[in-house]
Image (tube, rainbow, N blue to C red):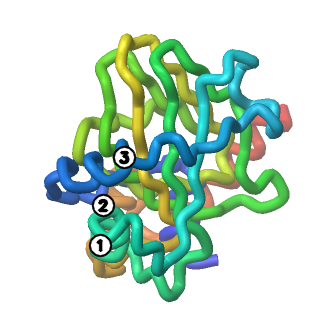
Amino acid sequence: MDELDLHLQLVPYLDLDATFDPAPVLAEVRAQLHLFQPERQRGLDGGDGGWASLDLAKDDARFPHTLALASSLVDLRAAHGIQLLLLRAGGVVAPHSDSPDRPVNLSVNIALEQPAGCRTTIGLAHEVPFRRASAFLLNVAATHAVTNESREDRLHLVVRGRPRRDSAWLLARARAATGCRDAGSARAALDARKTNRDL
């Protein structure tokens, strides 16, 4: 396990400081909203039917702007999934882990629409400070949940994989977030957390 993975177990999100215009992506996504499938079968939508998704192929001709944005943030050749996620106004995504059998599963989560009143919590009471036209690296092995208490829909683009950001930049940001200066201190912090849980 590399050092970045250790930090992302302590603080399971990292702002990628992305800059992009979501308008072209939103236009092509809104034209295909009828293709989204409800997530009821996974039992995570709180029973209200407010959460839906659409899986994208890496060469999907219907979504050139969407895939261009995804490719600018993640090497799609190494990605293991691209998905659009829609959470309707008033919708809920129940707490869950994408990978409960392992400590780290990285995903780049891109907020196309992020209304005020929509909250994403992850890990030990962390709230991801999403805003419209932002992108975060998340450790989705950590338990996470979403509530949309606004009157608007939330729309995110998710790419399963590591970001294109330079590894030194990512490590510097992760160390600042956790307060751990290196892999050894991050590992010690994780051990201390486990000890405290076991007491």
The location of residue 119, given as percent across then percent down, is: 44, 24
Q: Residue at x 53, y 65 (%)?
A: 56
Above/below status of 178 relative to 50? below
Residue that label 3 marks: 31
Question: Could you tell me which secondary element the residue under label 2 belongs to?
Answer: helix
Which marked residue is nearer to the observer: mark 3 or mark 2? Answer: 3
Say if 155 sits above or below 109 in the image. Answer: above
Label of residue 68 in the image: 1
Q: For the residue marked with disc 1, what is the amino acid? A: Ala
In the drawing, does residue 64 fall left or right of residue 53? left
Residue 128: quarter of image: top left
* Kind of residue at disc 2: Arg
Q: Circle 3 sits in a helix, a strand or a loop, which is it?
A: loop
Q: Which mark is residue 10?
A: none
Q: Is residue 73 visible?
A: no
Other residues around mark 1 within 10 Å, as few (<14) / some (14–19) / many (≥20): some
Is disc 1 in contact with disc 2, using a CB cutoff of under 8 Å? no
Left or right of 71 on screen, residue 192: right
Residue at 62 percent of width and 37 percent of height: 144
Query: What's the residue at 36%, 70% (across, down)?
Result: 67
The residue where tag 2 is placed is 173
Residue 140, visible in the rendered structure: yes
Quarter of the image where the C terminus is located:
top right
Nearer to me, 91 or 183 = 91
Amino acid carrying label 3: it is Ala
Residue 70 coordinates in the image, percent (x, y): 36, 68
- Residue 75 image position (x, y, % from top left): 41, 82
Q: CA distance from mark 1 to mark 2?
A: 25 Å
Eyeballing the image, is 85 above or below 50?
Answer: below
What secondary structure is found at the residue carrying circle 1? helix
| Position of residue 179 in the picture relative to residue 144 (left or right) | left
Which residue shows up at 78% across the image and 35% down it? 197
